[in-house]
Amino acid sequence: MIFEELALPGLFRVVPEPHADERGFFARTQCESEFAERGLVGRFTQSSVSFNHRRGTVRGMHFSKLPHAETKLVRCTGGAIHDAVIDLRPDSPTYLRTASVTLSATNRHALYIPAGLAHGFQTLSDDTEILYMIDRPFVASAADGVRWDDPAFGLAWLEPVTVIAPRDLAFPDWAGR
């Protein structure tokens, strides 16, 4: 695996290195020891799938409050997404900055998202599926979010928004917190 650190500390694109032959290929997509060598969480206790019918669907921007903040490894297993994160760690040199990548079933990249970052995505194709690997059990009372179009962050979405949940629409502006 190749670990490419992105614009926010601790945020990595994880690129598999396929070993190909006439059958196709085989590639490791997660290895606890390889993650640990880089000081990253490598043990994930929960996996979840998000399936989205329509291109343009936005989910986010979600995070879990301390002490239940989650580290995630996100991979698109069907279709494609524009994946976005916001650094909400007050002590971070990139506090309130954003980063984004395209994840797809074709490129097979994953995004390693450390605790303290808000996460969301927009589907770039119909019938898109995303696999989440999460380092701790979900705690509903810790779930929170910021608005997907909050001007404080200036996230640029690639498609017109076709579907978004009422909960995501109702998150307050960051400035109002």
Image (cartoon, rainbow, N blue to C red):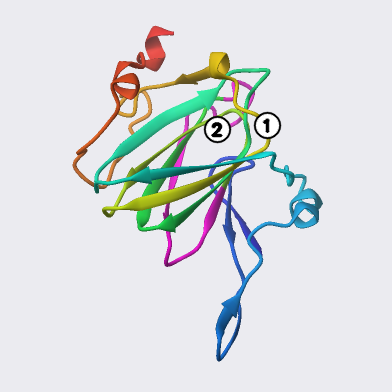
Q: Are the residues flagged by discs 2 and 1 in contact, CB closer than 8 Å? A: no
Q: Residue at x 56, y 40 (%)?
A: 8
- Furthest residue to the bottom? 22
Residue under the point 54% across and 27% down: 95
Q: Say above or below: 152 vs 1.
A: above
Q: Secondary structure at mark 1?
A: loop
Left or right: 174, with 95 as reference point = left
Of 4 and 107, nearer the camera is: 107
- Residue 141 location, quadrant: top right
- 94, 39: nearer the viewer: 39
Q: In the rendering, which numbered label is found on residue 114?
A: none
Crowd rating for badge 1 (residues with CA inside 10 Å; few <14, some 14–19, many 20+):
some
Provide the residue designation for mark 2.
Answer: 94
Q: Is residue 91 magenta?
A: yes
Over which residues does the magenta segment extend? Answer: 89-111
Secondary structure category for the residue under label 2: loop
Rendered image quadrant of residue 105:
bottom left
6 sits left or right of 32 in the view: left
Residue carrying label 1: 136
Q: In the image, what residue type sits under mark 1?
A: Arg
Q: Position of residue 85 (x, y in %)?
A: 47, 37
| Quarter where residue 110 is shown | bottom right
Q: Position of residue 48 (x, y in %)?
A: 53, 41
Amino acid at the residue labelled 2: Thr
Quadrant where the C terminus sits is top left
Q: Quadrant of the N terminus?
A: bottom right
Q: Main secondary structure of the magenta part?
A: loop
Mark-to-mark CA distance, 2 and 1: 25 Å
Sooner in the amino-acid sequence: mark 2 or mark 1: 2
Q: Is residue 153 above or below residue 109?
A: above
- Residue 138 image point, x, y percent: 60, 26
